[in-house]
């Protein structure tokens, strides 16, 4: 019972503690997930915007290179006069630009005449820019980078549709994603005499731009119509080149608005896995470019697998789990302590009750406490004290009753009942030890006269006075009892020779013969004593008593106080 | 008929738009069967799917005349019984004359039923070039230099060159003919403003470059697109004739229920299917006279595409021509 209360209490407290810790942990984890997701989205968006700015910067840089090359006098000279030395100088210029820009695959000077004949051409082969000559130079007049760029004003930049390069004779970047930029070379009259074209490796370029982004970021690029150009899954890129368009808005329907002119970024939070697509977060932003071939727009996107984003919050989660487990253990320990602190005083009270029940000292109670348990202990202590007092009173009453049942109410001497017990004990003892028992039967003479002369009160006073006297004068081992009326009996506690018994009878007669002082004057009576002894005068108590009584009557026949032995008294029938 | 309901399944392999839902539903209702339509979007896919299990996966499929020959050589088709195709009578005469259609008749049996077709005519801007070009030579005409658009594809361009050179069979170029053909295409390259691949791209280029004449690889589809874009365009079948592709229904070798397969082909020759083909896909059918808003000028004939001597070689050489190489380099190894 005791175990169960503290056990239940401990379990309850531990559960409450665990529940509180668990709920706190759960909500903390949820909050941290949300924070992680938000921060991942913000980071993605920031990185995407940074990437877009870099594209602008990069485009500006290529444009500046083109301006430098197209405005260089030697370029125009090469187109107009065609001196080999001029072409060599242009080639040196191109070589410098290509060395400085590893993403440039090809730089060319193409003339407007000769069906767009290439005049100077450098291709990247490995890390080197190699100049092509003779039959390797091709006619490019039908390509938009010539046809369209020749129509541009001074300093205008033509930007190609980003596509796969199928121009054979290209040593670098064949069948590779390509971006071409071209600018016209003008003569003094403002007529376009040719173009300078730079081929840029799209993947190399974006590789450079995105080089410092986290490895888990996945780069997406689409043209203004949504055709995927860069994708983590290379098979999804340049679908139009294989006769099967793959659109960004098919994979990310949320981006549709970007292709209809909206400028706001699109944040995508795919918490649920789609068929064939892992859950991810992504940010897409539109980037305006001056290029009708790309629908004047690029859409740049960065994505991160949700698992990666959540890896950080999983760390937090496992830390939270550890904290929660720690808190659970702590709350369990606290629960045990608290339940003990509560159950110990209760147990003390219970123990006190048990001891009290067993009649032992109650032991210490927590009466000093100022709480409910203290007040319980105090109540219990009060109750305990009261019960103890009542028990004591009861015992007194019992003792009184006991005394009353064995003593004469008037004289407080043992009554007939007690006397019979003692006689029986004495006889039993004597029988076993072969000893003797002496009984002296006393009957007051003329007691009736006292009552008649002085009243019953005087009689009572006389009896009381005589009783006190007998009690005081007899040995403790002897029993003086009042059998009723004016009859007394004395049982000697030790064996007595008949002579000694006679002496005692005489002493008794003297004691009784002394007058008793009372408000009514001196009261005086005599006494007749009958003596009987075991085994001489009988075997049983009744016989002994009867013989003592008989002897007393015999003594009574003599005037004045006297005593008689039963042995000296003829049987009643014979005497009478 | 109703007793057969659900028992038979007809497996159809076709191009998008050939087996329209209402056509399928009507067929299922009439014949108490179920039709499973699978679609393909390229010749390569079609070949792969039919050949995969020797034509056992389908009952009927649609293939063009140029491709048909290799299916017949691979024994992937079953001959058709014309008596089970009463609606053949609805077809125009030119589709009923089997001798004029490449490879449809073989060993005295009929193997295919023409269904959809489109020709590759010439488009001209009626303001810049008011006189409809009646010949493909217009593509080479120096008058239009820098105002011509052509298609970026080797197989058709070599056929075009062969036509321009007056050769009888544009699909078979002999060894001795490669040099003049290459020179002809280099001359085309020098005359054009650019080459296109997609119909939409063609529209953009046409407007951007202010083109006057264009070889319409996608036929009237491009005409519609240009007109929708505000170009006052005309369409001509040149006197040398226009290359044209012709898709035919063929019964697969593994057809389970040949009667049902015949019924399907017959059903598709009926008015509703033919009309839907023109309305929804802008493609010509074989049962009504060409028209529907577009009446090509010039009375040229159609030259149904046939297998060429070597697609690989045409593509390889064309890619070099397109890249700007001279003839020596193009024909070099």
Image (cartoon, rainbow, N blue to C red):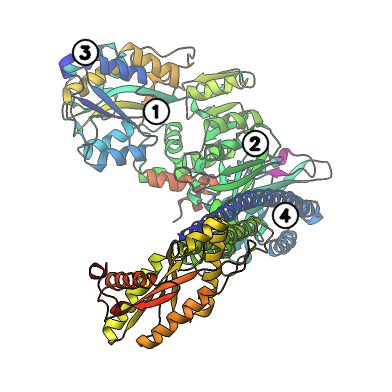
Q: Position of residue A483 (x, y in %)?
A: 41, 65
Write down the residue under mark 3. B86
Q: Chain of mark 2?
A: A
* Nearest to the observer: residue B119 or residue A344: A344
Element assignment for label 4:
loop
Residues under labels 1 and 3: Cα distance?
26 Å
Structural crowding at the residue carrying mark 1, measured as other residues with C-alpha within 10 Å and reported as few (<14), some (14–19) or many (≥20): few
Badge 2 and badge 3 in a common chain: no
Q: Position of residue B170 (x, y in %)?
A: 38, 34
Residue B12 seen in the figure: yes
Magenta-highlighted residues = A150-160
Which corner quadrant of the image does residue A156 belong to? top right
Q: Chain of mark 3?
A: B
Secondary structure mainly formed by the magenta segment: loop
Badge 3 and badge 4 in a common chain: no
Write down the residue under mark 1. B16
Residues under labels 2 and 3: Cα distance?
54 Å
């Amino acid at each position: 019972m005791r175990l169960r209360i503290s056990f239940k209490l401990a379990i309850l407290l531990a559960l409450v503690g665990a529940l509180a810790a668990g709920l706190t942990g759960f909500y903390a984890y949820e909050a941290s997930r949300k924070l992680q997701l938000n921060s991942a989205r913000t980071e993605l968006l920031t990185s995407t915007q940074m990437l877009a700015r870099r594209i602008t910067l990069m485009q500006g840089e290529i444009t500046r290179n083109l301006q430098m090359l197209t405005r260089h006098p030697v370029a125009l000279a090469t187109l107009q006069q065609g001196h080999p030395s001029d072409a060599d100088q242009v080639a040196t210029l191109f070589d410098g630009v290509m060395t400085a820009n590893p993403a440039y695959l090809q730089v060319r000077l193409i003339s407007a005449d000769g069906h767009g004949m290439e005049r100077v051409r450098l291709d990247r082969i490995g890390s080197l820019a190699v100049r092509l000559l003779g039959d390797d130079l091709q006619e490019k007049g039908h390509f938009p980078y010539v046809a369209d760029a020749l129509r541009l004003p001074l300093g205008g930049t033509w930007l190609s549709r980003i596509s796969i390069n199928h121009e054979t004779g290209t040593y670098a970047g064949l069948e590779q994603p390509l971006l071409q930029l071209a600018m016209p070379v003008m003569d003094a009259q403002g007529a376009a005499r040719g173009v300078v074209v730079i081929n840029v490796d799209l993947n190399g370029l974006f590789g450079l731009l995105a080089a410092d982004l986290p490895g888990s970021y996945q780069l997406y690029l689409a043209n203004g119509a949504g055709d995927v150009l860069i994708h983590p899954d290379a098979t999804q890129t340049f679908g139009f080149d294989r006769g099967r368009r793959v659109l960004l808005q098919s994979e990310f329907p949320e981006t549709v608005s970007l292709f209809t002119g909206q400028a706001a970024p699109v944040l995508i939070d795919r918490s649920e896995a789609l068929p064939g697509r892992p859950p991810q977060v992504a940010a897409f932003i539109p980037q305006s470019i001056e290029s009708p071939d790309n629908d004047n727009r690029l859409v740049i996107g960065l994505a991160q697998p949700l698992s990666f984003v959540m890896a950080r919050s999983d760390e937090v989660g496992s830390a939270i789990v550890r904290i929660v487990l720690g808190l659970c253990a702590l709350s369990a320990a606290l629960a045990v302590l608290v339940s003990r602190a509560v159950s110990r005083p209760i147990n003390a009270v219970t123990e006190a009750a048990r001891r009290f029940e067993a009649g032992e000292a109650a032991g210490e109670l927590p009466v000093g406490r100022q709480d409910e348990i203290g007040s319980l202990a105090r109540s219990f202590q009060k109750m305990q004290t009261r019960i103890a007092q009542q028990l004591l009173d009861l015992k007194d009453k019992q003792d009184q009753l006991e005394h009353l049942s064995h003593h004469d109410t008037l004289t407080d001497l043992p009554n007939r009942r007690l006397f019979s017990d003692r006689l029986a004990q004495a006889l039993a003892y004597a029988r076993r030890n072969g000893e003797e028992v002496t009984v002296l039967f006393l009957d007051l003479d003329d007691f009736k006269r006292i009552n008649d002369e002085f009243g019953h009160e005087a009689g009572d006073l006389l009896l009381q006075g005589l009783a006190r006297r007998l009690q005081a004068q007899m040995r403790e081992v002897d029993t003086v009892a009042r059998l009723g009326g004016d009859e007394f009996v004395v049982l000697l506690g030790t064996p007595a020779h008949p002579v000694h018994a006679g002496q005692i009878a005489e002493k008794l007669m003297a004691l009784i013969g002394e007058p008793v002082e009372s408000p009514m004057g001196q009261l005086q009576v005599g006494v007749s004593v009958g003596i009987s002894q075991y085994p001489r005068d009988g075997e049983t108590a009744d016989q002994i008593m009867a013989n003592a009584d008989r002897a007393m009557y015999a003594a009574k026949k003599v005037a004045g106080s006297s005593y008689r032995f039963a042995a000296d008294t003829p049987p009643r029938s014979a005497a009478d | 008929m109703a007793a057969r309901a659900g028992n038979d399944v007809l497996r159809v392999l076709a191009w998008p738009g050939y087996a329209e839902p209402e056509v399928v539903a009507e067929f299922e209702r009439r014949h108490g069967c179920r039709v499973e339509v699978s679609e393909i979007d390229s010749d390569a896919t079609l070949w792969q799917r039919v050949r995969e299990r020797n034509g056992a996966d389908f009952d009927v499929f649609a293939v063009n005349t140029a491709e048909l020959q290799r299916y017949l050589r691979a024994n992937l088709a079953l001959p058709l019984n014309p008596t089970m195709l009463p609606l053949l009578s609805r077809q125009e005469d030119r589709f009923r004359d089997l001798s004029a259609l490449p490879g449809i008749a073989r060993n005295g049996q009929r193997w295919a039923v023409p269904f959809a077709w489109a020709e590759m005519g010439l488009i001209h801007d009626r303001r810049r070039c008011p006189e409809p070009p009646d010949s493909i030579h217009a593509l080479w005409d120096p008058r239009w230099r820098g105002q011509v658009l052509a298609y970026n594809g080797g197989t058709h361009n070599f056929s075009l060159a062969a036509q321009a050179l007056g050769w009888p069979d544009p699909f078979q170029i002999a060894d001795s003919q490669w040099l003049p053909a290459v020179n002809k295409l280099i001359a085309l390259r020098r005359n054009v403003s650019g080459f296109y691949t997609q119909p939409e791209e063609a529209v953009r280029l046409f407007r951007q470059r202010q083109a006057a004449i264009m070889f319409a690889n996608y036929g009237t589809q491009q005409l519609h697109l240009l007109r929708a874009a505000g170009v006052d365009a005309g369409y001509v079948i040149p006197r040398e004739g226009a290359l044209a592709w012709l898709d035919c229904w063929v019964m697969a070798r593994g057809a389970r229920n040949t009667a049902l397969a015949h019924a399907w082909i017959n059903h598709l020759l009926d008015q509703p299917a033919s009309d839907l083909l023109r309305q929804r896909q802008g493609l010509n059918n074989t049962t009504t006279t060409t028209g529907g808003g577009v009446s090509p000028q010039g009375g040229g004939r159609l030259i149904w595409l046939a297998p060429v001597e070597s697609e690989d070689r045409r593509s390889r050489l064309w890619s070099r021509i397109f890249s700007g190489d001279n003839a020596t380099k193009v024909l070099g190894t």
